[in-house]
């Protein structure tokens, strides 16, 4: 039996129509993503504040608060993953308003599965590239108040890590062994109080945003 390919990341889908949830779940799962579906915005908010998916698909019309309200509560412009709004043909003005609130783009119903996968693949890759460039270019000057300062080498390792490099790639780039990279990463996480890799990226991104204020 063939080994299951590793997940390409989680995608959160918010839509009150079970048929839409099923379709998106099937199409995106087949493309290698792990799909988590929500029927309303409150359920999404509970999860989206504690962990970051690769992407969010958020329907404009959902029970309770609208997709637009949820987008604002997530602080769409600052949320560390691209957010797409799903809208019916009559919702274009609302979808444009959503883009002003930080949505990356909108997907019109009815949609074709293959087109959605292509658009999401492209958006997720472009977003990751942009984040990595933005992050690595500013890590050298970042300060983490109240934390033990990072050494120059730790900053270099952190820059490699936030650019998406594996331990092996980072080691090759910096001329040190993957094992040493692991040690540096452990020290960085300890100094910055990060519980895991995603938490570390979140700490760095938060600090960068505060540094821009």
Image (cartoon, rainbow, N blue to C red):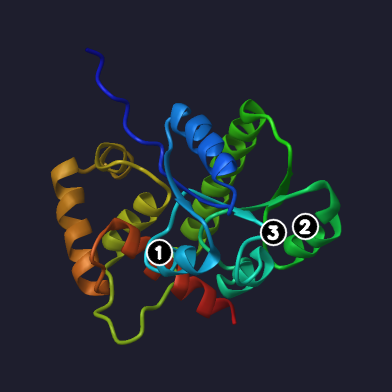
Residue 60 tag number:
3
Which of marks 2 and 1 precedes in the sequence? 1
Residue 29 location in percent, x, y? 44, 33
Rendered position, 111 above or below 81: above
**Quadrant in which the N terminus is drawn:** top left
Quick one: SS at disc 1?
A: helix
Marks 1 and 2, how far apart in space?
Answer: 23 Å
Q: Nearer the viewer, residue 162 or 142?
A: 162
Query: In the rendered view, does 179 fall on the left or right side of 80?
Result: left
Q: Residue furthest bottom?
A: 146
Which of marks 1 and 3 precedes in the sequence? 1
Rendered position, 19 above or below 183: above
- Residue that appears at 19% across and 42% down: 178
Marks 3 and 2, how far apart in space?
Answer: 8 Å
Rendered position, 125 above or below 186: above
Query: In the rendered view, does 146 fall on the left or right side of 99?
Result: left
Give yes or no for contact between labels 3 and 2 (Cβ–Cβ under 8 Å).
yes
Residue 95 tag number:
2
- Residue that appears at 53% across and 54% down: 131
| Image-quadrant location for residue 14 | bottom right
Residue 78 location in percent, x, y? 57, 68
Residue 205 location in percent, x, y? 46, 67
Label 1 environment density (alpha carbons within 10 Å; few <14, some 14–19, many ≥20): few
Quick one: SS at disc 2?
A: helix
- Residue that appears at 51% across and 47% down: 128
Query: In the rendered view, does 4 fall on the left or right side of 123?
Result: left
Q: Which residue is mark 1?
A: 47
């Amino acid at each position: 039996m063939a080994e299951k390919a590793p997940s390409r990341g989680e995608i959160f889908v918010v839509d009150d129509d079970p048929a839409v949830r099923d379709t998106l779940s099937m199409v995106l799962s087949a493309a290698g993503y792990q799909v988590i579906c929500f029927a309303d915005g409150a359920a999404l908010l509970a999860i989206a504040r504690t962990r970051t998916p690769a992407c969010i698909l958020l329907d404009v019309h959902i029970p309770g608060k609208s997709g637009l309200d949820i987008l604002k509560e997530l602080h769409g412009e600052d949320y560390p993953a691209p957010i797409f709004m799903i809208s019916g043909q009559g919702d274009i003005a609302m979808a444009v308003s959503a883009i002003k609130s930080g949505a990356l783009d909108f997907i019109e119903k009815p949609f074709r599965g293959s087109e959605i996968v292509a658009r999401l693949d492209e958006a997720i890759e472009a977003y990751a590239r942009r984040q990595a460039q933005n992050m690595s270019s500013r890590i050298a000057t970042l300060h983490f108040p109240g934390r033990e300062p990072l050494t120059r080498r730790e900053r270099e390792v952190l820059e490699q890590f936030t650019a998406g490099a594996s331990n092996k790639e980072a080691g090759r780039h910096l001329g040190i062994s993957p094992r040493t990279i692991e040690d540096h990463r452990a020290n960085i996480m300890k100094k910055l109080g990060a519980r895991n890799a995603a938490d570390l990226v979140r700490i760095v991104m938060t600090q960068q945003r505060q540094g821009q204020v």
